[in-house]
Image (tube, rainbow, N blue to C red):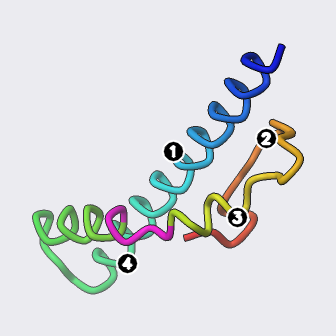
Amino acid sequence: MATQESSAVLHAAAEAVRAACLRAALDGYERAGMSGLCEEGRWEMVVDAIRSLDVDAIVRALPADGCTASINPAEKGVR
């Protein structure tokens, strides 16, 4: 049972990281486009946005009780 619970917590953490990466990529791409960067520059900004993610903030946004309810870092201000 404990293994199943820890697996669920790890899954929730992985989902939170994926959501944060996706949000960072989309935001970075959009900001770069508004700045007038070319396609290559936009993708460089996407990569930089993902590299600069605050992983500690994502971890802090996870429920402390291990509950695996849907976690949306964008709603919690995680970037």
The first of marks 3 and 2 along the sequence is: 3
**Residue corresponding to mark 3:** 60
**Residue corresponding to mark 1:** 18
CB of mark 3 within 8 Å of CB of mark 2?
no
**Residue corresponding to mark 2:** 70
The first of marks 4 and 3 along the sequence is: 4
Q: Nearer the viewer, mark 4 or mark 1?
A: 1
- Point 33% across, 81% down: residue: 34
What is the crowding at mark 2: few (fewer than 14 residues within 10 Å), some, or many (at least 20)? few
What is the crowding at mark 1: few (fewer than 14 residues within 10 Å), some, or many (at least 20)? some
Say which amino acid is labelled 1: Arg
Question: Which numbered disc covers residue 35?
Answer: none
The x, y position of residue 14, in whole percent, is: 56, 39
Prevailing secondary structure of the magenta residues: loop
Which quadrant of the view contains residue 33?
A: bottom left
CB of mark 4 within 8 Å of CB of mark 1?
no
The x, y position of residue 48, in whole percent, is: 27, 70
Could you say whether the residue bearing mark 1 is in a helix, strand or loop?
Answer: helix
In whole angstroms, how far apart are the C-alphas of marks 4 and 1? Answer: 20 Å
The first of marks 2 and 1 along the sequence is: 1
In whole angstroms, how far apart are the C-alphas of marks 2 and 1? Answer: 12 Å
- Point 22% across, 68% down: residue: 42
In whole angstroms, how far apart are the C-alphas of marks 3 and 1? Answer: 15 Å
Q: Which residues are magenta?
A: 50-54
**Residue corresponding to mark 4:** 31
Which is nearer the eye, 59 or 49? 59
Could you say whether the residue bearing mark 3 is in a helix, strand or loop?
Answer: helix
In whole angstroms, how far apart are the C-alphas of marks 4 and 2? Answer: 27 Å
